[in-house]
Amino acid sequence: MDITFIGAARTVTGSLHLFEYNNQKFLLECGLYQGHREEAERINRTFPFKPKDIKAVILSHAHIDHSGNLPNLVKRGFRGPIYSTSATKDIASLLLLDSAKIQEYDLGYLNKKQKKRGLPLKEPLYTMTDAEKTLKQFSTVEYKNRFEPVSGVKVTFYDAGHILGSSVILLEIEGKRILFSGDLGRKDMPIIKDPSVLQDIDYLILESTYGGRTHKSFQGMTDEFRDIIEKGKRNGSKILIPAFAVERTQLLVTILKNLYDEGTLKEVPVYVDSPLATNVTDVFRKHPECFDKETYKIFTDSDPFNFAGLNYVKNTEESKSLNARQGPMIIISASGMCEGGRITHHLIHSIENGDNIIIISGFQARGTLGRKILEKTKKVWIFNDEYEVRAKIYFMGGLSAHADSNDLVDYVKKTNNGRLKKIYLIHGDIEEAIALQGKLESMDNVDADIPQSMTQINV
């Protein structure tokens, strides 16, 4: 088996890995690279292989940095099956169509300015039609059911505990067992089950997003969230939370439901302003088999994704009207890295007001608008216009759906029963990967490498 690490090698975005066995090529993941606009354009539009030669794609989960370039792959000639769990397919159906829609909408907005300035117009990476074609190629397989995407390679999905339907992927070839972590989740988080641990593994391909950092406890994050809301209430703030439509929004809603029940949100309306997040929440309701015991039990009595103070924004007009309203209020809106969607328009209207608050609730890739806001850059560009960052910025990394450094080390300890030959660290900025590598190699009989893009190995 030859493996070429293409995307998410020494970076966190654009997951893409090429496998070849007996002249059969298949992919694990096909994600969008998110970062500097020109760099992202170049990377996303270019595949270092012929898409028509790919026999299958195996998808760990639906997040755009793992699935978002599939329509472009199809557009350029890929005709094989895309394997995932059914929950992943249901979420990907929403995300890919939304990604195409956002590209068309945002480019329309940008091209108006380009035209006025006499600059060339841009074309979307793919269209709604491309996304619709892609969805027809999905083939669903549930957890623990083995399948054979190409002759001689057996694959099984196990629960990754990251988002609804997410998987760690076990590949078995000629007696060798290769485990791909995808994005590994955290233990004891609300809503979904903890990550599955497998043993008797020969090679482990492991994410390292937070390889050098640890998260605060979930309770600690809830307490911090409460304190920020109290400050916002006193100052009449608009509290903007850029949030991924999958998992992060649902997690925030469950926390806010608890804060509402205890009285913290009295007279503070909450708006989920993301049609995608609203639709994804409906998908969550369809898949209670993915929930942990606590969330499953809540469903027997009430809806964990709704409460009296919560408003799911229904249309563009209502979204625009939020910009004219006074705080205090909380607006949760996609995209999570502020690279598109309605959050960008809320930022335009709120980021220069020093009374307002922006809560960054998850990882921000280098070059994204969210990363610049997190780093408290004094001025940022949104749709080719410059804005001063006067709003107060808070980071709540403890809400992350990614395992932290301690979780990753613990996962390796539980997985490694003496058979593990090599670990390959991917999906992490180089500093995080190096930090994790040091921790892992301090353990007995653990060898960890950090491949760069286009590194090829044979296992």
Image (spheres, helix red, strand yellow):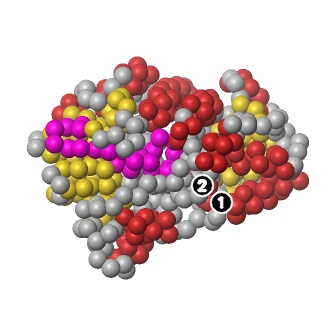
Q: Which mark is residue 130?
A: none
Q: CA distance from mark 1 to mark 2?
A: 7 Å
Taking the image as shown, residue 193 lies to the left or right of residue 430, namely right
Coordinates of residue 280 in the picture (x, y in percent): 57, 33
Answer left or right for 276 relative to 134.
right
Q: Nearer the viewer, residue 386 or 342?
A: 342
Q: Position of residue 240 (x, y in %)?
A: 71, 45
- At 25% across and 26% down in the image, what residue appears? 79
Horizontal side, residue 134 vs residue 234: left or right: left
Task: State whether residue 212 is above or below residue 368.
Answer: below
Question: What's the magenta region?
Answer: 148-169
Residue 47 coordinates in the image, percent (x, y): 26, 40
How packed is label 2: few (under 14 Cα within 10 Å), some, or many (20 or more)? Answer: some
Q: Which residue is mark 1?
A: 218
- Tell me, yes or no, whether the highlighted magenta stretch contains residue 294: no
Q: Quadrant of residue 383?
A: top right
Q: Image quadrant of residue 417?
A: bottom left
For label 1, the SS is: helix
Q: Which residue is denoted by mark 2 in the rendering? A: 189
Q: Are marks 1 and 2 in contact (CB under 8 Å)?
A: yes
The location of residue 362, given as percent across then percent down, is 58, 53
Q: Residue at x 19, y 37 (%)?
A: 150
- Is 153 in the magenta? yes
Say what secondary structure mark 2 lies in: loop
Looking at marks 1 and 2 on the same chain, the residue that comes earlier in the sequence is marked by 2
- Give the quadrant of the C terminus: bottom left
Residue at position x 53%, y 39% from top?
289
Seen from the viewer's position, the closer of residues 178 and 379 is 178
Q: Nearer the viewer, residue 135 or 243?
A: 135
214 relative position to 227: left or right: left
User: Residue at 34% across / 48% down in the picture?
Assistant: 169
From what the image shows, is residue 240 above or below residue 431? above
